[in-house]
Amino acid sequence: MAKIVLASASPRRSQLLDQIGVEFIVQPSSVDESKFDGQAAINLVQQLAAAKSRDVANKLDKGLVIGADTVVVHHGQVLGKPESDDEAYAMLSKLSGSCHQVITGLAVIDIENSTTRIDYKITEVEMREFSGQEISDYISTGEPMDKAGGYGIQERGAIFVTGIKGSYTNVVGLPVTKLVMICKDLGYQIV
């Protein structure tokens, strides 16, 4: 079995891989994500996932390198990770009482065979209406600051979500079924 390398410092992605029994190491990429701004969401997440996995793969001789990037899209607007409490408040205010998409780009590089697979997954998320006070209380936990769209469905942010259509793990940040199928397509059984 090839060594599996996660090109991400996201604890949520690591938890998902642990959850399904994958043995892996973490080696975060050093890609400057701001260089990819201004693109359509699907292109953005795929290009970022590919850039992250390529950045790490270029430092290794062998293994499978997994790169991923997740964004929230609300009425065509890409919402990444908020950089301030005010930005988190604005994002969550937009999401209140409406539906949005979570899109994750996924790239897997098989270094030894010089093969790359790039794909994406979209999940629809519906949120209840919530008050400004609820948003402020949530922001005070610090949870929104490292999450696309300013919320974590696997943490306290779950109180805002009334339903999803699609992959739950995609909303967390790594569509594990799609990942397993990509690896299988590359000839690797990772679980």
Image (spheres, rainbow, N blue to C red):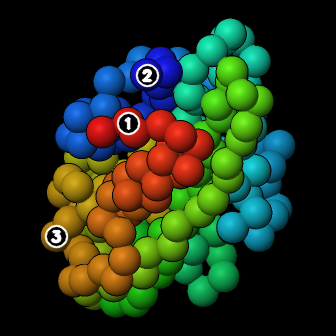
Q: Residues within 10 Å of mark 1 (few under 14, many from 20)?
A: many
Residue toward you, 132 or 176: 176
Seen at 21% across and 40% down, the residue is 19
> Where is mark 1, residue-wise?
190
Where is residue 46 shown, x and y percent of the image? Answer: 69, 55
Q: Could you tell me if residue 136 is visible in this image?
A: no
Residue toward you, 134 or 99: 99
> Where is mark 2, residue-wise?
1
Q: Is residue 155 left or right of residue 59?
A: left
Residue that extends furthest to the front in the rendered view of this protein: 187
Q: Are marks 2 and 1 in contact (CB under 8 Å)?
A: yes
Which of labels 3 and 2 is toward the front? 2
> Where is mark 3, residue-wise?
159
Residue type, mark 1 in image: Ile
Q: Residues within 10 Å of mark 3 (few under 14, many from 20)?
A: some
Quadrant where the N terminus sits is: top left
Seen at 44% across and 75% down, the residue is 123
Count of all numbered marks drawn on residues in the image:
3
Seen at 64% across and 31% down, the residue is 110
Where is residue 64 shown, x and y percent of the image? Answer: 56, 28
